Amino acid sequence: MVQSIPTQEKQAVALTSVTAAIVLIAMKLIVGLWTGSLGIISEAMHSGLDLVAALVTYISVRVSDKPADPDHPFGHGKIESLSAFVETTLLFLACAWIIWEAIRRLFYHNVHVEPSLAAFSVMFIAITIDTFRSRALFRVARKYNSQALEADALHFSTDVYSSSVVILGLILVYIANQNNLPWLRKADPVAALIVAGIVVYISLRLGKRTVEALVDASPEGSSSRIAEAVSRVPGVLRLDRIRTRQSGPRLFVDLRLTLHSNTALEHAKAVADLVESSVHQLFPDADVVIHTTPSEPPTGDLVEKIRSIANRRNFQVHEVTAYEVKGCINVILDLEVEPSLRLDTAHDQATALEQDIKRGLPEVCEVNIHL
C-alpha cells in the first residue's frame, strides 16, 4: 500500500528521533561511567527512556494513520494518546530512580566526579542534537496535528534544559576541585535532582493532556469556538448540544441543532452543510455529525402546530385554516402530493396526516384535506 506524504513525513521524523536517541545513549553512558557523574548517568537513563518513547511514537504513528475499519469505526488515532501515556509513565519511573540515587549520594555515599573535557563535550553535543530533533518533531506535529509527535517533541525538549543543568553541575564540581571546596562537590547530585524536577513538571503536563484524550475530554476551547461559529449560520435557531472528542490528529464533533419547524428537508440539509463548513474552517480534518430538530411552535399558534405535524412526514401543506364552530375546531388545508401518485395512494397520505393532526391536537374535531 502506497503511503501518503503526511504519513511518510511523520514516520521519517519519528525514525530520525530513534536514531538520535541511540547515539546519545551511547555517548552519555560511556562518559558518565568514565567520569562518575550522576548527572550524566541520569541523562543517559533519560535518553534511554527517550529511545523507548521514540520507538513507541514511531510505532504509534504507523498504526494511527491506518484508515477506519469495522472494528475501529473512529479510526486508530487513540494509539497516539496511548503512546504519549506510556512516555509519561516511563518518565516518572526515570525520575524516581534519579531522585533516589541523588539522595543516596547527597547523604549516604560519596562518589568522585571527574568533570573532564569529554563530559562537557558530550553534553554540548547532546544539547545540539536535542535542539534540532525537538524542533523537527514540533514542526511536523503542528503541521499534521499529531499528538504522539507533539508529546515526543515535548519529551525531547526537556533534554535541552536538563543537559544545561548537568553542565552547570559539572562546572561547580570543577570549581570545587580547583579550590578545595568539598561542599560544592554536591553540585552534581543536586543538578540531578533539578533534572528530575524538570522532568516531573513536564511529565505532569504531558500526562494531564494524554489522560484527557484517553477519557474523551473535550479539547480545551474547541466547544466554545465551534458554538460561536455555528451561532452565526443563518437558519440555526439554537445549538442544543455539542460534543467533541480528540482521536489522534482528528477531532470528532457531534452537534444537535434546532431549526424552524416549517423548514423544508432540502433547506435543513443546506443549513447543516453550512454548519459543517463553518466547523471545517476551524478544524479542517474534523469528522462532523449533525442532527437537526424542528422548533416547537408557540403554544397558541394552532396553524403552526399543524404545519409542524405535516413537516414530520415531509408533507407540504398550504392554505391552512383553523376555525371554531360551537366549541369545536375545524381545520381545512391543501396537501401537495406527487402528480404521478395513484388517487388511492394520495388518499392514504391524506388519511395518515388527518390522524396525526387529531392525535397531536385533541382539540381538533374535523380535518378537511384537499389534494
Image (cartoon, rainbow, N blue to C red):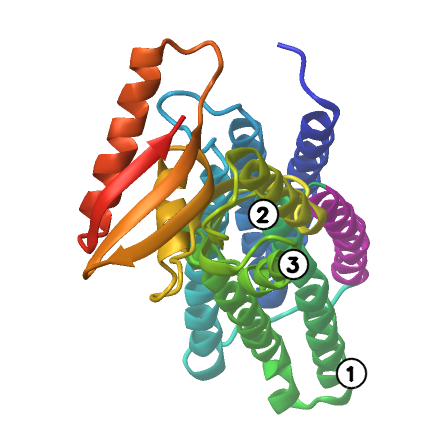
* SS of the residue under disc 2: helix
Q: Which amino acid type corresponds to the residue marked 2 in the rendered image?
A: Gln
Location of residue 220 in the rendering, given as x and y in whole percent from the top left corner: 55, 64
Q: Which amino acid type corresponds to the residue marked 1 in the rendered image?
A: Gln
Please tell me which residue is depicted at 72% across the width and 62% down the height of the picture: 160
Residue named by callout 2: 147
Q: Earlier in the sequence, mark 3 or mark 2?
A: 2
Residue named by callout 3: 229
Residue 114 showing in the rendered view:
no
Q: Which amino acid type corresponds to the residue marked 3 in the rendered image?
A: Ala
Given residues 344 and 175, the one toward you in this image is 344
* Residue 135 sits inside the magenta stretch: yes
Please tell me which residue is depicted at 75% across the width and 59% down the height of the picture: 123
Badge 2: residue crowd in 10 Å (few <14, some 14–19, many ≥20)? many
Residue named by callout 1: 178
Residue 350 falls in image quadrant: top left
